[in-house]
Image (cartoon, rainbow, N blue to C red):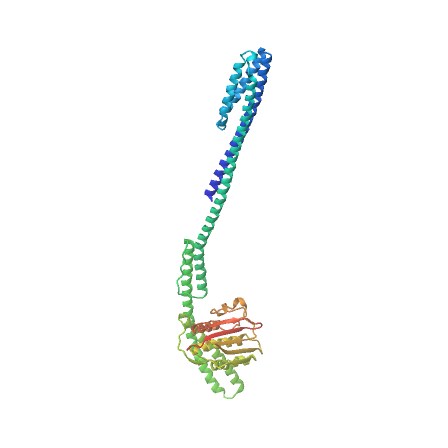
Amino acid sequence: LALALSFTIASLQRLGEQSERLFQSGVNTTRLIEQLADRVTEVERSARQYAVVPQPNLQQIYRDRREALLSTMRALEARDDIQPLIPALRELHGLLDSIEASMKLPPAERDNPQSFAAMNEIAGRARQIADELFEEELARLQTNVAQLRTALIALTGAVGAAALLTALAFSRLVSRPMRQITASIDQLGRAELEKPIRVSGPRDLQSIGISLDWLRQRIRDLEAQKSTFVRHMSHELKSPLANIRAGIELLGEEVGHDPEKKEITGIVERNAARLQRQIDDLLRYAGWQDARPPQQPTSVKLAELIEKSAQDQEFEARSKDIDLRLHLTPVTLTAEESQLRAIVDNLIGNAIKYSPERGVIDVRLTRLGDTAVIEVEDEGPGIPVELRERVFEPFFRGPNARASGTGIGLSLAMTAARAHGGSIRVLDKEGGAHLQVVLPLGE
């Protein structure tokens, strides 16, 4: 841009100087040519008067006007821009000398009229030559203007193309590191913490990559600490819980057939069992965060597994007067049974937890090609669209979360589904939540 601007300024300056010279030259030349014609006429008039009345004062007037004409001719001869006038001016000199010589002859021998006519013809020719020179200079100026216009158009195109190429190069230079940064942030968001983060490109963007990699390592360390803490605490809780459940069994034997005490004992037993499941979920979460869930695939009858999970959670459903409806197609698949049970338990348990009193839960099992599809629908508050991805994050609790629960149920279900090459997603539903699990049947 600086070079283009310099070229434009210099070119416009040259054109300005050329046009100024042309204007000044045209004005001065026109003035001298008009002056030449006027003085030729004055010389002719004074010479004729002196020839008729040969008085000294008329002779002096002729001399003065002749000298004025010669002065104008010398001014024209001194100009470099009208050299084609020189031959005409020389002819005019010769005619003036001829008239001067004839003025000394007797009147009868003078031949001045023809000389005067020739002088006027030379003055007219000088005007024509000057006009032609001015037109040539004007045409040259117009040519230069057209050339400059063409050059500026070409220069504008070149500058535009250079700017576009520069922008593309800069965009390419920056867009790749920006894509790497975006991908790295997505990687952190998906908790993929083992792959190092590298960002190429300018030094500032590389420093962002270094900071992101530090953040990855920091998150990985914190996740490891969290998993260790959860695992240790879960193990610490299992021992007293086992003692509590053993004490409940002994208490159940002592209460005998007292209905009221037996009901209280049953409530405590069921809550202890629920606490046991939550601790088991925490242990599974801690173990599955360290490595991929272990796989010991067996042939599993999925409909029977869903029925057993529903039976085990029947008390929670009955306590809220929930109608748990099963629509099951017999499907057999090869998978790790405990992990399938974790998926089903968490989906049905979540539906019970968030369903209103006297609500309805539909659990469907169908076969679609080489996959088994499990769908669980409830009539609870549902899952907002903006939270449908986050509900599968560990320990995430949405605005409608209940006080009980660990917040890792759906995360465990998603981990188990992915370990089998399947997926879980939230489908659209008015007035409740609708979750769908797709699992390959396997071999």
Check the image and name the residue furthest to the front.
Answer: 108
Residue 123 x/y as whole percent:
55, 24
Quarter in which the C terminus is drawn: bottom left
Front-most of residues 404 and 61: 61
Asked if residue 352 is positioned above or below residue 385 in the image, the reply reads: below
Q: Out of 35 and 20, give the one closest to the viewer.
A: 35
Q: Looking at the picture, how far across and down is residue 350, in whole percent?
A: 51, 75
Give the camera-side residue of 346 and 232. 346
Q: Is residue 74 something one can see in this rendering?
A: no
Q: Is residue 61 visible from the viewing direction of this image?
A: yes
Q: How many marks?
A: 0
Image location of residue 341, percent across then percent down: 46, 78
Residue 334 x %, y %: 42, 78
For the point 59% across and 16% down, which residue is it? Answer: 48
